Image (cartoon, coloured by chain):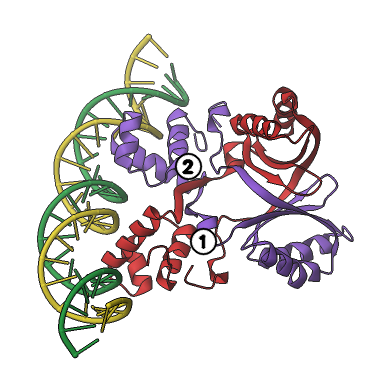
Chain colours: A purple, B red, C green, D yellow
DNA sequence: TATTATTTAGAATATTATTCTATATTTTGA
DNA sequence: TCAAAATATAGAATAATATTCTAAATAATA
């Protein structure tokens, strides 16, 4: 019975991924339950690893990090050693929010958040370009931010995962 | 004096973006303050828009959404109307987590999360490819997820924003 | 330097989280 | 199908936290 989610679990997850400060009391009200089962279900979902973490999402612009840039990277070689060295260095850059190894005409796709275009130039010159494994790089400077959500589409799931 | 962040504010934001369930009591301890000023600073940061929202980040894999795909999109035309129609449709797709208008050899860069490659094929055939404004598309299938954080690098900021 | 505005500490109160017990419900296997 | 076992629930009780309030301390201003 471990690791099965019913509809109540999915609703709890969905509510929490939209607002994790909702009280168990309010959750219980929405679910027509008392607080105890809701509380225990949440603890179970946490313990079994369905919930990675609870975070505050900050306003990048207000904080002064106004520029997002995606970078497609092609390495010089593709041995395991190359990949690992590249990843280690990229992971150390605080500007890098996401890094995926991908198929297609890039080896990696990075998402970078920093103050502005100048900061981006500096980042490339003083950090990214110093990675010896680096081959070609293609930048996609964000001109306008569209949709940007962290909430997964739980409704699409056939329940009982 | 409105809209200026001092080091205490930045530390609060940094702690909250790593774990927003920390109690004001624990925050206060870390900051060598009593709970009142911490509580009031948080409320101020919320009211002034530095904090967008508090969310639970779920484990995509465990929930059954195992595939991330980035899609570079080029539109057929670039009138305002084209852009708006494209954005409206893309925003309606629950699979789309992020959408940026970018410079470079794509007009838009999308990040998609769904169950698997089959679901991706279905998404492209039944949703994405139906957008009439769509020109070329290039997919980057995530092979391996590397770094993936939501915490901004507040230490890089010269304080007093 | 005196006045005003902010920030803070500490106490008091309101709410919520968490635990506990007993009951109800579901599941399982004979 | 039925009874035993396991699981989930409600409701009460307790522990902890959030939130408010008052007064003192600090910083800003003219």
Q: Chain of mark 2?
A: A
Q: Quadrant of residue B78?
A: top right
Please give the name of the residue rendered at 51% of the width and 61% of the height, measured from the top-left corner: A63
Q: Chain of mark 1?
A: A
Given residues B52 and B2, the one toward you in this image is B2
Residue that badge 1 annotates? A63
Horizontal side of residue B85 vs A126, given as left or right: left
Residue B159 drawn above or below residue C20: below
Residue A58 drawn above or below residue C23: below
Given residues B58 and A141, the one toward you in this image is A141
Disc 1 to disc 2: CB gap under 8 Å = no
> Would residue A157 be visible to someone looking at this image?
no
Q: Residue A112: x percent and y percent?
A: 67, 58
Given residues A31 and B91, the one toward you in this image is B91
> Would residue B160 be visible to someone looking at this image?
yes
Residue B112 drawn above or below residue B42: above
Q: Residue A152: x percent and y percent?
A: 56, 38
Q: Residue A41: x percent and y percent?
A: 40, 39
The earlier-in-sequence mark between 1 and 2 is 2
Circle 1 SS class: helix
Q: How many marks?
A: 2
Q: Which mark is residue B114?
A: none
Q: Residue C23: x percent and y percent?
A: 21, 28
Q: CA distance from mark 1 to mark 2?
A: 23 Å
Have a look at marks 1 and 2 and say if they share a chain: yes
Residue that badge 2 annotates? A17
* Closer mark to the observer between disc 1 and disc 2: 1
């Amino acid at each position: 019975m471990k690791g099965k989610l019913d509809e109540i679990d999915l609703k709890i997850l969905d509510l929490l991924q939209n607002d994790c400060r909702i009280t168990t009391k309010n959750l219980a009200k929405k679910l027509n339950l008392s607080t105890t089962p809701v509380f225990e279900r949440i603890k179970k979902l946490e313990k079994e690893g369905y919930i990675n973490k609870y975070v505050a999402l900050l306003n990048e612009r207000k904080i002064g990090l106004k520029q997002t840039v995606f970078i497609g990277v092609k390495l010089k070689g593709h041995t395991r050693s190359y990949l690992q060295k590249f990843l280690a260095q990229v992971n150390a850059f605080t500007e890098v929010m996401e890094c995926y190894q991908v198929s297609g005409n890039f080896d990696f796709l990075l998402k970078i958040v920093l103050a502005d275009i100048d900061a981006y130039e500096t980042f490339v010159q003083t950090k990214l370009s110093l990675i010896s494994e680096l081959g070609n790089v293609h930048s996609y400077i964000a001109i306008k931010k569209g949709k940007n959500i962290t909430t997964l589409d739980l409704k699409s799931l056939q329940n009982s995962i």
